[in-house]
Amino acid sequence: MKAIIIGSTKHLFLAALYASIGIALALLATGIYFLNARPELSLWHTVELDNEFHYNTKLASFNEYLALEERLFAEVERKVVQKIPANEFSPVNRYVKNSLSDPAHWPQNWNRSYEWPVADAEFGILLLHGMSDSPYALSNVAAHFKGKAHVLGLRLPGHGTIPSGLTEVYWQDLVAAVNLATAHMRQSLKCKPLFVVGFSTGAAVALNHELERISQDKNPDYAGMIFISPAIGLAPLAAAARWQSWIGRLLELDKLQWNSIQVEYDPFKYTSFAVNAGDVVYQLALRNQGLLAGLTLPQRAQIPSILTFQSVVDATVSTSAVVNNLYQTLPEKGHELVLFDMNRLDVNAKMVSNDPLAGLLASINSPALHYRGTVVENISHETTQVQARSFGLAAQGKVVTEGNEQVRALDLYWPAGVYSLSHVALPFGVDDGLYGAIIQPDSHRIQIGATASRGERGLYSVSASEMLRQKWNPFFPYLLERMDEYRLAHMH
């Protein structure tokens, strides 16, 4: 009887195991089918470029990087722009000459690296854009510092050309390019301070640059670091990216190399997103977390002061990771964090299913914070006007306690119909020519931020969620004000 029971149990276990394997394979096959049923890939998804920079490319200077970049764009012209089939011609295709999305319609091609030197500049600004972006991502910040500082906007490898550039990029490529640009700026500025402004992945690369140096007991290169929506942590789902990519390569299904395949209507940002790109950001974030954890307390104190601007609502990077994995680990050294809350008008607050600020309150309300913090929030539930409320270390260096908060009303308001910022909105003002809200009727180029198309779902190749995503920051003047305040405090 015992043997019969054991045998039956064994058979049940094997049956359950085989059933589980069968279900898993069926789900995998279904997932592969739907991923592979997406739109066909275009030239810009499949062409390989030979002149892109990689970490093992032998270059002696940043000027050589620019020369290689020149050959790279000539290659894009030759292999893609001149070979687009007639059925791909569209008034909003960035690779079609004279289309509304042609980068040539802008006074400057922001897909390329640029440098604006100033004779005897008192400081330098190095600008690092995010994943799938181009130097345009920080063009509004660059305009603010133009003529005041020696400015360099770096095009990170894999960017500004064609989306396929992100299928083969490594995080080490981004780091190596930043090393070249930083060395160039340090040499140009001599002993004058260099500040880095990093957006999203650009912030993660800037942080990595300093953590790598500090971990090797080298002096930091930057007088200060300004981060906008920094990629400190991502959702755990990002860890699965390399598996999707690996399966695609194994089965020779090129579409599996992509999380999204869309019309390339944005002149300065890829709208198609390579699976590898997400994995690169994830691996870079892991590298930074490992470096941070390995620093001694004296080494951690060497990290340059950081000023961060972060929306509490961010679908791309983790706001919680910015607070808990970065700021909570930093010793006191003039670090500052500015959080943009959601629009808490009554009608908005009552529709929120999961308050994004709730999970952060325990961290930012601690009386033992070693950094200065600010929340930009509604003055009340009845008004769209916002205020800046301090927490942690106040401007005077005193700990702010409950009932002793410093509050300053700002002459800034939430726009009608906007319930929060987004990951991509923070570095752009309302008057930005591409992502801003001011319609320019005489312009013969695409204006993404001013578009508000409405209709039935499922018709456009661009998703409704992407069209409705907030593209500009109504509090951008305050962001610039805080940048200037921070820079002046760290000019040493």
Image (cartoon, rainbow, N blue to C red):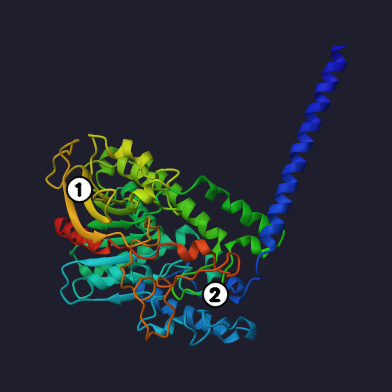
Q: Nearer the viewer, residue 384 or 295?
A: 384
Q: Quadrant of residue 457?
A: bottom right
Q: Position of residue 361 (x, y in %)?
A: 32, 39
Q: Amino acid at mark 2?
A: Asp
| Disc 1 + disc 2, Cβ < 8 Å | no
- 54 left or right, relative to 404: right
Q: Quadrant of the C terminus?
A: bottom left
Find residue 50 and name its label.
Answer: 2
The CA span between labels 1 and 2 is 44 Å
Residue 444 appears anywhere in the view: yes
- 115 left or right, relative to 279: left
Q: Nearer the viewer, residue 30 or 375?
A: 375
Which element is circle 2 on? loop
Q: Amino acid at mark 1?
A: Gly
- Identified at 19% across, 42% down, the residue is 393
Q: Position of residue 316 (x, y in %)?
A: 45, 54
Q: Badge 1: few (under 14), some or many (20 or more) residues near its Cα, within 10 Å?
A: many
Which residue has dot 1 on it? 334
Earlier residue among tags 1 and 2? 2
Q: Quadrant of residue 164?
A: bottom right
Which element is circle 1 on? loop
Q: Position of residue 412 (x, y in %)?
A: 23, 60
Q: Is residue 382 above or below residue 188?
A: above
Find residue 443 and name its label.
Answer: none
